[in-house]
Amino acid sequence: LYFSAQEGILIFYHIKDLQYEIKICADISQPISSLIFSPDYTSLLLVTDQGTVYSYRPAHSGKAVKLLDTSSNCFLAADFLTPGNNYCVSVTISGEVQVWSLEDGTFLSKLNLGIEVHVT
């Protein structure tokens, strides 16, 4: 079970039978607004409401790696662009949809929807 604390800490609970172990996986020092697993569960996107997206790979037990920083207070959400785990898509309140490479955070393309977007 993965979850985030208010301070931007990614925590893992390993539960087996009646025993559990708590592990702090990453500290990104920004409140995490959502956690999204890749379709094959090898990567986890950590999304902040400030527009920063980090990648964490549970099997590698490494640090969370900053993929992109839109530095936008209009940032709403991000998710994996399937199939595969190579790209993510983000959206802003103004309706700009952006595609990013998960390898190095390279901005690849954008599409302006021309409408304001809301999350429900």
Image (cartoon, grey):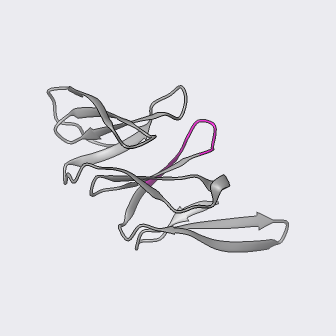
Residue 64's spot in the image, x, y percent?
49, 59
Q: Quadrant of the N terminus?
A: bottom right
Q: Residue furthest right?
A: 17
Q: Quadrant of the C terminus?
A: top left
Q: Is residue 101 left or right of residue 72?
A: right
Q: Is residue 52 left or right of residue 59?
A: left
Q: Identify the residue at horizontal 67%, vertical 74% (top origin).
A: 22
Q: Identify the residue at horizontal 67%, vertical 67% (top origin).
A: 13
Q: Identify the residue at horizontal 20%, vertical 34% (top origin).
A: 95
Q: Magenta span covers which residues?
A: 34-42
Front-most of 95 and 42? 42
Residue 37 in the magenta stretch? The answer is yes
Residue 117 in the magenta stretch? The answer is no
Front-most of 66 and 32? 66
Residue 19's spot in the image, x, y percent?
81, 73
Q: Is residue 99 left or right of residue 60?
A: left
Q: Identify the residue at horizontal 42%, vertical 69% (top origin).
A: 8
The quarter of the picture where residue 30 lies is bottom left
Front-most of 65 and 91? 65
User: What count of labels does the image hold?
Assistant: 0
Front-most of 103 and 50? 103
With respect to residue 98, does 77 lie above or below?
Answer: below
Residue 90's spot in the image, x, y percent?
33, 39
The quarter of the picture where residue 91 lies is top left
Q: Residue furthest front?
A: 104
Residue 7's spot in the image, x, y percent?
40, 74
